[in-house]
Image (spheres, helix red, strand yellow):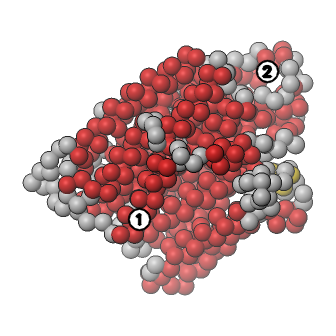
Amino acid sequence: MGAVESLRFFGPELVLIGAILAVIAIDLVRGREAGEWPGTVAFIAAVFALAATLRLPGVVGARGLLAGVPQSWLFGRMLVLDAFSVFFKLLLGLSLLAAVWMSLRSPEVRGRPNEGEYFTILLASGVGMFLMAAAANLLMAYLSLEFVSLTSYVLTGHLRHNRRSGEAAMKYLIYGGVASGAMIYGMSWLFGLTGGMDYAAIATGVGNLDSTSRGALFVALVLVLAGFGYKISAVPFHMWAPDVYTGAPLPVTTFLAVGSKAAGFAMLLRFFAFAVTTSGPSPAVAGVPLTVLLAALSVATMTLGNLAALSQTNMKRLLAYSSIAHAGYALLGLVVFRQDGLDAVLLYLVTYYLMNLGAFVVVMLVAIQTGREDIDAYRGLAWRGGALPAVALAIFLFSLAGLPPLAGFIGKFYVFAAGIQGRMYVPVVIAVLNSVVSLYYYARVVKVMFLDLPGPGDAPVAFRFADLGVVGALSAATTFLVIQFGWLLRTVEAAGRVFRG
């Protein structure tokens, strides 16, 4: 489709772009007198962007969610419309909505002189992630990922006079610059080998390569993987995550842990599962140890994340290493290069959204009450007026560990099952052992909340009814998803039908 015709499928992005202009105008006209207007406009825009995504053709139909989404190129083969991209736009829209809501509640954001700038950049980052989900061209993939990275650096350093926030932003910038340079260098190799920019042309070009191009193709894929691996915080591109998660404002940390990771997986899955490995019996592809490379990446990521989390005493840092480990679990579904593996990754990302978002919401609410982020701040939380948040956090943490009958168990079950069907027995066994290891540091937090008695410095806490409602809804979804998850399986199966050009 041309540019004008493509606009009717570009509704969610247009809503966010309009909101960005509105927030900028409010900030310029009202200045410090803008009050809650920038955040309110951003929240309304996030709601309308999510609604605009649901109103795209074929998203909601008689056959189920995403079952009737058409498939087509947009904007001259720069973007693509299919159920896969719409699935991630829904997930990213929910992530943006959660980040804006958390920002409206966070003292790290509210009442600061640069509040309008913050919501402008947050919405801009949301637009970039939507473009990442639909990118099917090397140029668009790089530009969208780089745009999201640049906005993320600024959001991380939002607390201007906080040394920890500034240090986190600087580290993020340095690591991101190196990964970005490696990725675009690999993309230039790939373009030189295949002569194509969009993924369909790359798939055709890779299929026509002979065995003499095997080494060059392998180098190109490793370099591209560096950029995608940095975005999902996979080992060894994970080094930014703990410091950034700790130094950034809590709403930004949540957005990076949930939204940015989902956008990174959208690009990673589309590129490796459909641009490279669906090109037919090519001698070059057959000689590239891509499965071994990704399996090693998955095992290293989950193992390092879990082992490093064992000694953490800060909740944000603990959840940062936990996020790294979960990227390793999700990668296991990609390693098998089968349709059921792709479906398992999509299912896993939905469950990860629920339980990780819920955990960060509770961490934010406790930080608002206590002014602390360390695990000792949770001592006796259940007996200090925080019984519901304590129970909810226990549900989220045990779900992250993969205990039945919680949502995390369903996600891990399907990922591990896909690995077994793909005969990846060693990585699956290592993943199961890692899940056992993770149970220790998750249970340690639960033990502090319920079994440790409050000390003299542990004051009672009180939470707003609206906040408890959000926490209760997320914990209920995490608990009861296992009972009614047939619709989710049908949705991820529909989302797995990717447009191949």
Report the number of discs: 2
Residue 244 can be seen, yes or no? yes
Give 377 or 28, whichever is nearer the viewer. Answer: 377
Relative to 178, residue 41 above or below: below
Query: Where residue 38 sits: x, y (%)?
Result: 52, 75
> Which residue reaches farthest left?
456
Question: Tag 2: Cα neighbours inside 10 Å, few (<14), some, or many (≥20)?
Answer: many
User: Which quarter of the image is occupied by the C terminus?
Assistant: top right
User: Where does label 2 land, which residue?
Assistant: 285
Amino acid at the residue labelled 1: Gly
Relative to 406, residue 131 above or below: below
Give 380 or 8, whichever is nearer the viewer. Answer: 380
Say whether marks 2 and 1 touch (CB < 8 Å): no
Query: Where residue 418 sits: x, y (%)?
Result: 63, 28
User: Which quarter of the image is occupied by the N terminus?
Assistant: bottom right
In the structure shown, which secondary structural element does the residue marked by tag 2 occupy? helix
Query: Where residue 455 sits: x, y (%)?
Result: 12, 51
Between the C-alphas of marks 2 and 1, the distance is 51 Å
**Residue 76 sits in quarter:** bottom right
Residue at x 57%, y 48% (from the top left corner): 484
465 displayed left or right of 154 = left
Query: Where residue 391 sits: x, y (%)?
Result: 33, 51
Mark number for residue 469? 1
Residue at x 36%, y 49% (from the top left corner): 393
Residue at x 63%, y 36% (from the top left corner): 344
Residue at x 17%, y 44% (from the top left corner): 452
